[in-house]
Image (cartoon, rainbow, N blue to C red):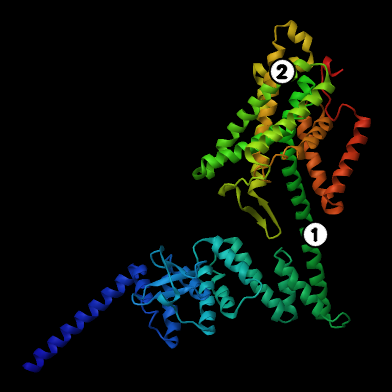
């Protein structure tokens, strides 16, 4: 009877322990962070012989803290605090102490001396294991961008474990970009290690890829083959590789042309914004405004001031700076017109000299207020980075936004001049000033508003230029000559002519620069414009109306 009762007690105890163990396992599976915390507590006291399975278990938790922890361990930055055994990331600072970050809590701790912490044990074998685990984590990540980045790093020197993992994952991969990159990596390995027929098949697949590693591998394999051979397989392989390289080179050349067009349109967009205001004032008033470049400079400095006043609104600074730059430069333009230009009408030489003097005054004023040193304007996060079309061609977001923004400004100005009463008065004054006055159009105020509008758009151009170059007192001088060239080439006072001229000159410059250099390219463009004006003095799209005669 006693033995029977003892057996019952043992059975009940076994059932209790099993249920308790299962409960703990379920709890750990439901809460991977808790499992990671439990495993990291074992790192300080674990021997090197026990580290490999422990690291495997840590990698299996797949929490947000898993990858950083393994990366810190690989980089030799994973330590634990003596006494508390808290796992931290330690980085040396200038004070010969270590800045600590709690790995699991992601909180910064007070700096300590080296004697207070100790590095978690690693060796070369363990680091190799960690690299494989990191690759596996990245290749199985939910975000396709992470998987693509991991594959891009593996494409040059993939290890055996990564190749085996890619072979396992490729069939189940749903993202086409990730899958094609996986196939490229496998084909490269076949090209290096396969037989002749396998290599020919791999080359047929690889000729569709523009990855730099593909071309390098093809070139290496072609050089390794004997130049004089009678083997049919080798001859077929040589022909396949040569054809593949020709195909890849032709695709690269095509995308190089597209890239030059994109850069040309980007430069043309800047020239458009810089010249469009000058086209209005020059076309309506016949004024050669040498201070137009300084209106651009004022817009750029407005952006700089906005970022100084609102440092916490960097992502929205450009949306604040655009209207402010328009108001600042436009107000200065109206002030110049009311105080100087209107007294010099019909005297182009005196107007040119007066506006040149004003440009010098504005430059010196800016030097006095902001100092002669260039100022750096930060770019918002949404303007950084690029849109990757393929491995050899990408569109930078900053240039893409500038093209879109310049076209928006152009069409908005075109709409104002075509559909508003102000635009009607501007067109009337530009075509026949005397008749417009006879019809009660206040030409003096039209001149002032037109000059202010042109100066305001120049200020907006300054906001754009602040994202491409440093802001300084001489910023506008670099674009004033190009602006005049665009206006004269397109046709004085014609907005469509300004658009075509700006985009044409920008594209021509970008195609010439790789061949001749930037200085010689500018000279060639200038000489070409001089010859063109000899044939068509009024530009591509001459202005219509009696004043044009």
129 sits left or right of 217 in the view: left
In this rendering, the answer to whether 22 lies above or below 438 is below
**Residue underneath mark 2:** 447
In the rendered image, the vertical position of residue 265 relative to residue 128, given as above or below:
above
CA separation, marks 2 and 1? Answer: 54 Å
* Position of 53 relative to 536 (above/below): below
Residue 150 in view, yes or no: yes
Residue extending farthest to the front is 368
Q: Quadrant of residue 367?
A: top right
Mark 1 burial class by Cα count in 10 Å: few <14, some 14-19, many 20+: few
Q: Residue 95, position in %: x, y? A: 49, 67
Which residue does the image show at 75% across and 54% down from the upper left? 255
Quadrant containing the C terminus in the rendered view: top right
Instruction: State the quadrant of the N terminus.
Output: bottom left
Q: Which residue is mark 1?
A: 250
Residue 38 at x, y percent in the picture: 34, 74
**Residue in the foreground of this view, choosing between 84 and 366:** 366
Q: Earlier in the sequence, mark 2 or mark 1?
A: 1
Give x and y (percent) for residue 521. Answer: 85, 47
């Amino acid at each position: 009877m006693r033995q029977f009762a003892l057996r019952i007690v043992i059975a009940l105890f076994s059932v209790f322990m099993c249920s308790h163990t299962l409960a703990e396992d379920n709890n750990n599976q439901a809460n991977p962070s808790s499992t990671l915390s439990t495993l990291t507590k074992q790192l300080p006291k674990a021997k090197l012989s026990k580290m490999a399975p422990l690291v495997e278990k840590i990698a299996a938790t797949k929490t947000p803290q898993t990858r950083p922890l393994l990366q810190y361990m690989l980089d030799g930055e994973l330590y634990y605090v003596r006494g508390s055994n808290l796992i931290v990331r330690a980085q040396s600072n200038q004070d010969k102490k270590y800045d600590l970050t709690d790995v699991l809590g992601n909180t910064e701790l007070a700096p300590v001396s080296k004697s207070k912490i100790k590095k978690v044990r690693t060796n070369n074998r363990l680091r190799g294991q960690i690299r494989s685990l990191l690759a596996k984590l990245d290749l199985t990540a939910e975000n396709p961008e992470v998987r693509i980045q991991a594959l891009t790093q593996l494409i040059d020197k993939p290890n055996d474990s990564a190749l085996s993992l890619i072979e396992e994952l490729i069939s189940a991969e749903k993202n086409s970009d990730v899958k094609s990159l996986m196939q490229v990596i496998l084909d490269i390995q076949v090209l290096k290690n396969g037989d002749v027929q396998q290599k020919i098949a791999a080359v047929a697949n690889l000729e569709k890829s523009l990855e730099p590693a593909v071309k390098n591998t093809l070139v290496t394999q072609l050089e390794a083959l004997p130049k004089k051979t009678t083997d049919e397989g080798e001859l077929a392989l040589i022909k396949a590789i040569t054809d593949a390289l020709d195909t890849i080179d032709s695709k690269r050349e095509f995308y190089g042309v597209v890239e030059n067009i994109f850069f040309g349109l980007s430069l043309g967009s800047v020239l458009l914004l810089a010249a469009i205001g000058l086209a209005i004032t020059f076309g309506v008033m016949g004024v050669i405004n040498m201070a137009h470049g300084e209106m651009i400079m004022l817009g750029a400095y407005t952006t700089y001031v906005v970022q100084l006043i609102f440092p916490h609104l960097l992502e929205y600074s450009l949306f604040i700076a655009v209207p402010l730059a328009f108001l600042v430069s436009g107000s200065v333009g109206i002030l110049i017109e009311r105080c100087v230009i209107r007294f010099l009408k019909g005297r182009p030489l005196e107007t040119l000299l007066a506006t040149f003097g004003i440009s010098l005054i504005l430059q010196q004023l800016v030097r006095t207020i902001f100092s002669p040193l260039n100022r750096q304007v930060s770019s918002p996060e949404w303007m950084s980075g690029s849109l990757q079309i393929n491995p050899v061609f990408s569109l930078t977001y900053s240039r893409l936004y500038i093209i879109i923004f310049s076209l928006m400004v152009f069409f908005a100005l075109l709409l104002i001049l075509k559909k508003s009463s102000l635009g009607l008065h501007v067109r009337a004054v530009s075509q026949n000033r005397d008749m417009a006055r006879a019809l009660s159009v206040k030409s003096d105020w039209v001149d002032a508003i037109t000059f202010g509008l042109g100066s305001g758009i120049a200020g907006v151009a300054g906001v754009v230029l602040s994202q491409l170059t440093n802001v300084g007192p001489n910023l506008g001088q670099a674009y004033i000559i190009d602006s005049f060239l665009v206006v004269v080439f397109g046709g004085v006072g014609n907005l469509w002519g300004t658009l075509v001229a700006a985009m044409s000159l920008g594209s021509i410059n970008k195609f010439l620069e790789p061949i001749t250099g930037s200085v010689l390219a500018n000279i060639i463009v200038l000489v070409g414009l001089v010859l063109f004006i000899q044939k068509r003095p009024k530009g591509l799209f001459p202005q219509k109306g009696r004043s044009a005669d």
